[in-house]
Image: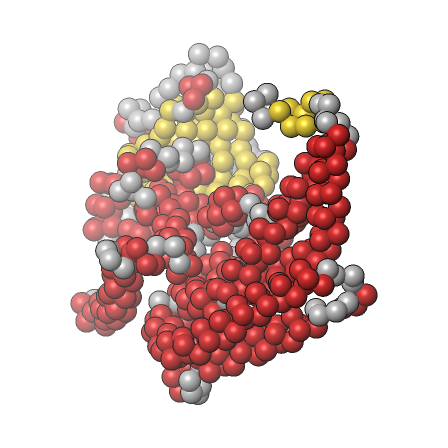
Amino acid sequence: MSIKIFLPLELFYSKENCNIYGENKIGDNNCISYYITCAIADAKNNKGGSEVNRLQITQRFRHLGHIVNAKEAITLQRHQDVALSFVYDDETPNIYLNKLSIKPEKPGKINVFLFEERRILKLQDLREDLDAKVADECDDEDASATHNDDLHILYQLLNVKDTIVHDDTRGGPIEDFFAHDVKRCVFRGFEFSFNFMMWLLTVFLYQPPFKYIFQHTVLCEHYREWIKFRNCGKRRFNIAFDTFLGLCVMLILILYIDNPGNYLITSAHYIVNKFRLLLHSLKGSPIGLKLNVQLNNFLLECFGYHVELWDTFLNAIEPCIRQLFVPITILGSMGLSYQLALLSDIISVIGLHAHCFSIYAAVLYKVEIKGLQVLWKMFLGKRKNVLKNRVESHSYMNRQLYLGTVFFACLLFLFPTVLTYYVVFTTLRLGIGFVSYILKMIRRQILEFPMEMLLNWSVGRFYDSDSLQLEYVEHTPSPLLQQDMEMKMCVFKLKVNPSSLGRVLSCHSGVLQELVAKENNSIKNVSRKILTGTF
C-alpha cells in the first residue's frame, strides 16, 4: 500500500488553524491518494471572506482534515475523527503529519507532493483533455474513457475550485451585467449566426436530393473533418482563427476584387492552349523519341478532339464558375478552410477532362505492361496458373511461340509511344492533383497547427505535463508522528518548467494523424500506383 498526499505549497508553511478540503481516491494496488485543494480558516480566525464561497467549497469538496497548532492538546483531541491531521509549531518551518486515518499493512513512507495551483492550471495538455472530456460527455462510448491518473484528477479539482473563486470575485449587479451578460449576449449572437450557417450547410450536404450530389465532394469531406476537429476540443483557437481569416477573405473579395472567377477561367484556358501546343509538338520525333507514326497520329486525333471538347466545356461552364464564387464568398463566414475546400471542388470540375485523359492513357499503359509480362513468361517457358495462383513451367507449341513472338514485338515497339502519352497525361493530372493537395494541406494545417500553444510559448506561458520535475524538499521531521506506524514523510515539489519550442510544435490533436493514416498517400505508394498504371 502506498499513500500520496497532494498539498498546496502555501499550506506546507501555514501557521494558522484551518480546515482542509479536497478529495481522495483508492487506485490500483491499494494506492490511496489525497488531493487537498483548499483550506478555510476556523471561524474564530476568519477575518473576512465570502460566506457563499465557503458554502460552495464545503458542498463541493470533501472535508479531509485540519491544520492545527501542536501546542493545543485539547484541539488535537477534538480533531481525531478525520482522514488527515497536520500540526505546526513555532520551531519548525513546515507542517507535519500528525494523524492518518488509514493504517498501512506494512510501514512505509508517505509521499507528499507540493504544487502551485496557478502553475498546475496552466498545463496545456491537461486543459485540452478536460475540454475534450466535456465535449464528449454526452457520448456513451467516450464518457467511459476518462483519465484516472493523479495529475488529471488534481487539475479537474483545481479547475472546479478556480471556477468557484472566480464566480465569487465578480462585481455587483450593474458591473456584472455589463462585464459578463453583454459579452455573453454578443457571443450568443455570433454563435447563432454561425450555427445557422452550419445548419444550412448540413441541409445541402446530407439532406436528399442534395446529398446525392455533394456527398463525394471535397466540401463534404472537409465538413466531416471540421466536425472532428471541433469535437476533439483541442483546437478551439484554430477554429476561431479560421473564421477570422474567412471573414477577411470575404471582405477582400467583396470590396477589392471584381469577378474573381475570371482569374480561374483565364488560367484554365491558358493551360488548355499550352496543352494543345504540347500535343502538336508530339508529331514526328519529339526530342529524339522514335514514336510509331500510325499509332501516334491516331492518338493525336483522339486526344486532340478531347482537348477541343475540354475547351468547349470550359466555355460552357464559364458563367457557372463565376457564380460559384458567390458561395465561396459566403462560406467565408464559416472559415477560410471551407473556402479552400470549395475552391478544390471547382478546380476538380475544371480539370475533369485531364482526369479522363489520364484514365485513357493508363488503360493503354496497363494493356502494354500486362501483355509484355505475360509474353515474357512465355519466352521463359512459364505460365501463370490461375487456379493454383502460382507461376509454373509449361511447354509451348511452335505456333504458340511464333504468335507470341509477333505479339511481343508489336507491343514492344508500340510501348515508347504509349509510354510517352502516359507520361504526358499523368504529369498533367499530377499537376492538378498537386494543387488540390496543397489546398488540402493548408486547410488542414489551419485547423491542426498549435497556434494557441505557440502564442503562449512566445510570452513564456506554455506549460505541459512533460515539463514537470520532481524536486526533493528538505523538511524538519515531525516529533509527534505516531511511532507505532513509523510514518515518514517524503516531500517533493512539483516544479513546472516552461516547455521548449519543439514540444510546442509536437502538440497534435490526433485528428490529422488519423486522417493521414487512412489515406496512405505516401510518395512510395503514389510512385507504385504510377508505375503499375493504377494512379
- Residue at the image position 75 percent from the left and 36 percent from the top: 402
Q: Is residue 209 above or below residue 115?
A: below
Total marks shown come to: 0
| Residue 501 x, y percent position in the rendering | 62, 56
Viewer-proximal residue among 113 and 476 = 113
- Residue at the image position 50 percent from the left and 43 percent from the top: 518
Q: Is residue 245 above or below residue 75?
A: below
Q: Is residue 45 above or below residue 306?
A: above
Coloring scheme used: secondary structure
The answer to whether 468 appears left or right of 330 in the picture is: right
Question: Which image quarter: residue 201?
Answer: bottom left
- Residue at the image position 52 percent from the left and 74 percent from the top: 308
Question: Which image quarter: residue 315?
Answer: bottom left
- Residue at the image position 27 percent from the left and 27 percent from the top: 78
| Residue 346 x, y percent position in the rendering | 44, 68
Which residue ends up furthest to the front in the rendered image? 399
- Would residue 320 be seen by someone viewing this image from the given angle? yes
Viewer-proximal residue among 62 and 341 = 341
The answer to whether 516 appears left or right of 221 in the picture is: right
Question: Which image quarter: residue 143?
Answer: top left
- Would residue 535 be seen by someone viewing this image from the given angle? no
Viewer-proximal residue among 1 and 286 = 286
| Residue 186 x, y percent position in the rendering | 25, 71
| Residue 213 x, y percent position in the rendering | 32, 59
The answer to whether 361 appears left or right of 250 in the picture is: right
Which residue ends up furthest to the left in the rendered image? 173
